[in-house]
Image: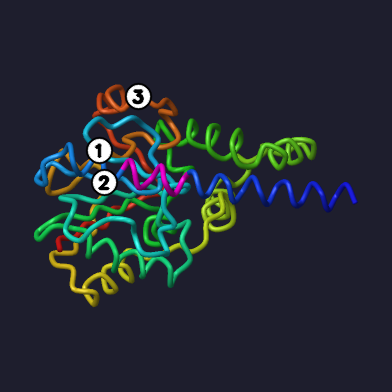
Amino acid sequence: MDTVIQMIQNLIKTKVKKFIDFFLARSLIRNYLIKTPPKKRKLIVGGHWSNNPGWLILNEGHQDLTKKLKIPDSSFKVIFLEHVFEHIEFIGAVNFLQEAKRILQNNGTIRIVAPFLEKIISVNLESGNKYCQTYIQNSLINLTYPEFDKYLKSLNLKGINEDPNVFFFNSLFRKNNHRFIWSAKLLKSVMKALGYKKVEVLRPGLGRNKEYIIERRQRGVYTGSSWQKNLKFKQIFDPESLVVEAIK
């Protein structure tokens, strides 16, 4: 009986939270659109790791990206996603791209930063790059596979460092609630089929407009949350990501 009561309580809490998030999102969107001139409207969906003044940031509680967006047509100059796209099921992701096109202004930009197949299979964390070991320690050992690292060391092996590329590959395909890992080639083809123009595949840190390049400069190396500090890194290190950028 206690278990049933607990389940009902949890269900009620979930529904109340969704109700609050729904109205909070509507309020956030409405206030932002009222206060921000059309040419300056910039949207981040799926949340972001840093505070970005001037951007409207909607997290997963504000909006189900697989459903119709609670945003009027032609509202935003740019839409940005960083390590969000891989958390959406395939069909839902395509639905989002259609909705994103609807809410973009003419000649508006969508910028998607994500782990893409081409990048993942090309990475060698044993290459000698000075940042690779820091990435292995922060992202693979501390964050993702601490128990595996400890277990391998108990066998008198080097832990995750015995073969970090294997754990790197598995972490991106199996961990962090990733639902579908795209290739940049496939995403480019789908976006063109949906009517996007000038679809480009880029390295992190590159793009048409510097104002829209707000992704991490040092993924797994700089783990802070200061956007201004992250900008100071001149050398970009991101073993996971590519960027797909397009115009409506």
From the viewer's side, name the closer residue of 128 and 82: 82
**Model colouring:** rainbow
Q: Earlier in the sequence, mark 1 or mark 3?
A: 1
Give neighbour class at mark 2: few <14, some 14-19, many 20+ (Cα, 10 Å): many
Distance Cα–Cα, label 1 vs label 2: 6 Å
Identify the amino acid type marked 2: Leu
Q: Earlier in the sequence, mark 1 or mark 2?
A: 2
Quarter of the figure that contains the C terminus = bottom left
Label placed on residue 43: 2
From the viewer's side, name the closer residue of 8 and 100: 8
Distance Cα–Cα, label 1 vs label 3: 15 Å
Question: Is 90 inside the magenta-drawn segment?
Answer: no
Residue drawn at 40 percent across, 27 percent down: 225
Distance Cα–Cα, label 2 vs label 3: 19 Å
Residue 176 x, y percent position in the rendering: 56, 49
Q: How many numbered dots are placed on residues in this image? A: 3
In what element is the residue under mark 1?
Answer: strand
Q: Which residues are magenta?
A: 21-28
Residue drawn at 61 percent across, 36 percent down: 141
Residue 162 x, y percent position in the rendering: 63, 43
Identify the amino acid type marked 3: Ser
**Residue 127 as seen in the image, left or right of residue 107:** right
Residue drawn at 19 percent across, 50 percent down: 78
**Residue 213 as seen in the image, left or right of residue 28:** left
In the picture of the structure, the residue carrying the numbered disc 3 is 226
Identify the amino acid type marked 1: Trp
In the picture of the structure, the residue carrying the numbered disc 1 is 55
Q: Earlier in the sequence, mark 2 or mark 3?
A: 2
In what element is the residue under mark 2?
Answer: strand
From the viewer's side, name the closer residue of 147 and 225: 225
Contact flag, marks 1 and 2 (Cβ < 8 Å): yes
